[in-house]
Amino acid sequence: MTFRRDRVFASPWLAAGGCLLGISCTGILGSQDDGNQDEPEQGASVAPDGTPLHHMTASEYNNTVAHLLGTRLRPADGFPAFGAKGFDANVSALSNLSQVLVQGYYDAAKTLAADAFSNEAQRAAILVCDPAEGAGDGCAREIIERFGLRAFRRPLEAAEVDRYAAQYADAQTTLEMSPVEAVQHVVRTLLTSPNFLLRIEVGPDSKRSPGALNGHEIASRLSYLLWSSLPDEALFDAAEGDELATEDELRQQVDRMLEDPKSAAFFQNFFGQWLGTRTLPSHNADATRYPSWNDEVKGAMLDQVNDYFASFTTGGRPWSEFLTAPHPESRLLEPIYENDPEGVREGFLTLPAFLTLSSRADRTSPTSRAKTILEQFFCVPLVPPANVDIPELGAAGGDEGPVENVRQELEKHRASPDCASCHDVLDPIGLSLEIFDPIGAYRTAYPNGDPIDAAGVYEGVAFQDISGLVPVLVEAARQGKCPTEQLFSYALRRRPSGGDRTRIEEITARWGGGTVADLVKQVVTSEAFRLRAKDKAP
């Protein structure tokens, strides 16, 4: 990675960035630049790179069928995982289609269609007319057009309507189905179409601009950004009326959509993937060492952190307070907070959810906590030294048994020149949180009775614990653009390219660290969100 001093913020992270660059543990603290990205030419116009072909994720699939069919089934919970990174980007979507996944789609479609038509309310929402009444297939075509609009998130083309109408007729003659059964058969087929399973942007360009997305494509981008699901009737109407072409309308839609309960999917999926809280349900702690740990407490941690995220999106709290804001109250988490001294706990980094996820089951992990803070919250990539075998804590000193005093074990790691380069950067941050145990409860001693020492010095600032380090982190966060980069990536389902860097900086400057809702509005009104990729010359 090339060191460009003109691209690094003049912040307390500068010296740390230089330290990392001078050693094998690489990363530029404060710059958030990706060394693999091309740099835009000075003064060159930056064309948006569009959105890649994208599979619906498991959460998007479950939400979409719920809002499309009214079902409570969650078939995608059983689909094989893609293992995608970067907000489930699903790069090369078609190449990810395994036979197991394809069979899962077909089985889910059959089950979902049967469920929808076995329920009177769900069936009535699909059968907008009675296909058994009247001659011909006029009613069936109306059902196909209306249901297809919502399933494909766009109006069906005439040839598509003809094809599904022919399938409807064939189901009656060849398969000897009743008119309603034939409609169910078509619904099942629509649910296995690539136009349903993939988010595809291939519609005609708007007459407003050669590069503009059409209204239905914008509506779909908005709905999957904020709801992880298909557009509602208001969005479909706005798309049909070409009302999503103005920035004012987009801002109004963002306000409306965030007020809808479906926006909970935004907190769960955007923040959950960016800051890792989505993995909390699968995290385990050692209940023999920490008896208050159980599934109920785990669920309360997730609810609390999602409420915390909501306060910065719909609650009006500015992002500048993300590391200092008070925690939402939780009755189930009171035992974790009961021993807190005054002023020791504030902001995201002392939430039980974060402290738990960045720990091991049996002990804290200062290295993991610091690495999570730098990589996730500050968007600083950290690469361990090449060709170095990094031992587990406890192995460095040859001692057997569980690690009790983590700080002592880290001192052994730092004694190795290969390990010291990274630990000198990570340890002050991670050790500042040692006053919190693996499930986030305040403590003053390790399990073996050794007193906790969370003191350190970072960038010339001495502190006794995390409360003294937070002001340094707040200043670094104020100067960074990580939230913009993360939301930009989530909205477009791709990593920013070189041409996006200027736009991200502009969005960050306009946003000014306001609410997350304000940041959403800046992203959705940007050209990258509103325009399709320009054709590249052969």
Image: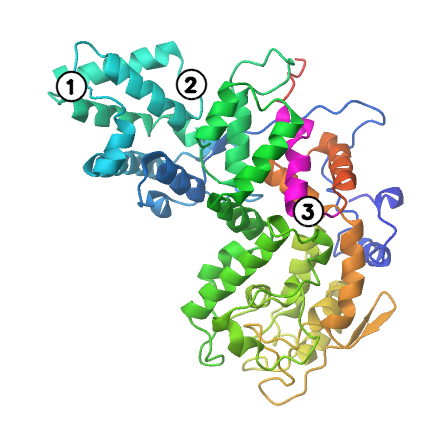
Give the magenta-colored segment's residue range: 513-531
Q: Residues within 10 Å of mark 1 (few under 14, many from 20)?
A: few
Disc on the earlier residue, 1 or 2: 1
Mark 1 belongs to which amino acid? Ala
CA distance for labels 3 and 1: 54 Å
Other-residue count near label 2 (Cα within 10 Å), few / some / many at <14 / 14–19 / ≥20:
some
- CA distance separating discs 1 and 2: 24 Å
Q: Is residue 267 visible?
A: yes
Residue under pointer 2: 155
First in sequence, mark 2 or 3: give its number.
2
Q: Is residue 116 magenta?
A: no
- State which quarter of the image contains the C terminus: top right
- Tag nearer the camera, 3 or 1: 1
Quadrant in the picture for residue 47 = top right
Instruction: Report the side of 106 relative to 248 (left or right).
Output: left
N-terminal label among 3 and 1:
1
Q: Nearer the viewer, residue 127 or 182?
A: 127
Indicate which disc residue 416 carries. Answer: none
Residue 427 in picture, x, y percent from top left: 73, 69
Identity of the residue drawn at 64% across and 62% down: 348
Q: Which mark is residue 483?
A: 3
Return the x and y of residue 281 as percentages of the image width and height.
45, 60
Magenta stretch contains residue 527: yes
Question: Which residue sits at x=62%, y=68%?
Answer: 391
Q: Amino acid at mark 2?
A: Pro
Q: Is residue 300 above or below residue 193?
A: below
Residue 420, horizontal then vertical, whole percent? 76, 67
Q: Residue at x 62, y 39 (%)?
A: 489
Q: Which residue is mark 1?
A: 132
